[in-house]
Image: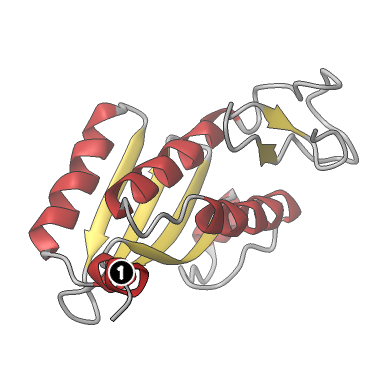
Amino acid sequence: MPAYLRNVEDSYIVAPEAVNSAIMGFSNSFNDIDIQITRPLGSNAVLMYVVLGRTLRSVVILKGWLIEWVVIREGYDERRRNFKPMSESKIQSFQKVTDNANAAMLHFCAPTHPELSVKSFLTWLHSYITLFTQPCKKCGLHLSNNLPPTWRDLRTLDPYHEECKP
């Protein structure tokens, strides 16, 4: 089997305790992030509920170290009525963040360094703690087209509106 395929398989086959320990260690390094881990489909599938302060909630599905699915949700109305964690948000700003999270998930995928890819993704996701408070790095506005800066630069984590991103 080619080496690159073995690395991908290694990302799937990992001790559950190692994944839990690393994720909880990351969670403990920030005081405004709360991560809950469940394993509903067996020992290798991981369902993470990530809460970023009062800004957003997300559901991240991992298989071993490989991020397979992300959805971002929040909003007072979404929490109260018929909350289904796997369904998409009805709020446009969180739909945009979900789209960007799925792009980031692919960007940070590194089969040779699977733990680093999850940590990098969670660091990027943590940058959304300022979703509604930090202005766009390019135009300096908090809102553009009635949306906050929903895009975060993948290297610098700077916030941008979709139409302002470099």
- Residue assigned mark 1: 3
| Element on which disc 1 rests | helix
Determine the residue positioned at 36% across, 60% down. 111
Q: Name the residue: 26% across, 37% down.
A: 26
- Residue name at image x 70 percent, y 41 percent: 150
Residue located 12% across and 54% down the image: 18
Of all residues, the one furthest to the front in this rendering is: 2
Viewer-side residue, 49 vs 26? 26
Residue 101's x, y, as percent? 57, 53
For this orientation, the residue located farthest to the top is 140
Q: Which quarter shows the N terminus?
A: bottom left
Relative to residue 143, is residue 4 drawn left or right? Answer: left
Question: What is the x, y in percent for residue 102?
Answer: 58, 59
- In this rendering, would 32 be left or right of 44? right
Q: Given the image, on which type of amino acid does mark 1 rest?
A: Ala
- The image quarter in which residue 152 lies: top right
Front residue (pair 106, 68): 106
Whether residue 37 sits left or right of residue 93 in the image: it is left
Vertical side of 159 occupied by 104: above or below: below
Please determine whether, in this image, residue 148 is positioned above or below residue 42: above
**Whole-percent x, y for residue 71 in the image:** 53, 62
Q: Quadrant of residue 4?
A: bottom left
Colour scheme of this structure image? secondary structure
Crowding near the residue tagged with mark 1, few <14, some 14–19, many ≥20 C-alpha atoms within 10 Å: few
